[in-house]
Amino acid sequence: MKNILKGCGISIAVVLMLFIVFTVISVISNGACSPPSKTFDEEKALCKELSYDDLFKDTNRYRGWHVYYNGALLQVFEDDFFPNTYEMRAGTNGTSNDVYLKYYGDKLNAVPLYDDDNKLGSNCSRVEYVAIVQGTETYTTISGAERTIPLLKVIQIRVIPW
């Protein structure tokens, strides 16, 4: 009888553990993907004006600020582990000054994102985005140099015409 109760206890513990793991994964991947409560223009109206030069020079000073920029997508990476999670490098306000974006959401309403690695020049997507300044991101360029640029968490993003 003890062995049966012990086996039931282990089974219940395993099922409970699996439930917790799947719940956490679901909250992380889907919770961040909930539909925005404000329109793009409402979010944009809440943004503070911040030049790229000021953001780049002292990124940590502006942590938590809501900002608006637009520019060409330079690179787009889809996260292999979490669905609907993208990391992008994008230009700012029509310049080659770039920021590192993290976006958690749908695929821009099924509009394909083309980055400069896959399409040349004006064939890449041009986007506008509202984001929160998170800090900096350091990455290694294809030439092997390390580069640090501002990191922004995207609240809303949309493709705009050239």
Image (cartoon, helix red, strand yellow):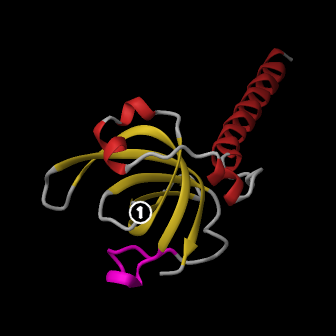
Does residue 118 belong to the magenta stretch? yes
Q: Residue at horizontal 75%, vertical 37%?
A: 19
Q: Is residue 149 visible?
A: yes
Is the magenta region chiefly helix, strand or loop? loop
The residue stretch that appears in magenta: 113-125
Q: Residue furthest top?
A: 2
Q: Quadrant of residue 160?
A: bottom right
Does residue 121 belong to the magenta stretch? yes
Q: Amino acid at mark 1?
A: Asn
Q: Residue at horizontal 59%, vertical 57%?
A: 83
Q: Using a 10 Å C-alpha cutoff, classify the residue at mark 1 as few (fewer than 14 neighbours), some (14 to 19) or many (20 or more).
A: some
> In the rendering, at what x and y percent does residue 94 appear?
38, 68
Q: 143 or 152: which is nearer to us?
A: 152
Quarter of the N terminus within the rendering: top right
Q: 134 or 57: which is nearer to us?
A: 57
Relative horizontal placement of residue 144, taking residue 137 as reference (left or right)? left
- Is residue 148 depicted above or below 81 in this figure? above
> In the rendering, at what x and y percent does residue 64 appear?
52, 34
On the image, numbered disc 1 is attached to which residue? Answer: 93
> In the rendering, at what x and y percent does residue 59 appear?
36, 37
Across the whole image, how many numbered discs are drawn on residues?
1
> In the rendering, at what x and y percent does residue 107 appear?
61, 68
Relative horizontal placement of residue 45, taking residue 130 as reference (left or right)? right
Q: Is residue 137 visible?
A: no
Relative horizontal placement of residue 69, taking residue 104 as reference (left or right)? left
Q: Quadrant of residue 6?
A: top right
Q: Residue at horizontal 82%, vertical 26%?
A: 8
Query: Could you tell me which secondary element the residue under label 1 belongs to?
Result: loop
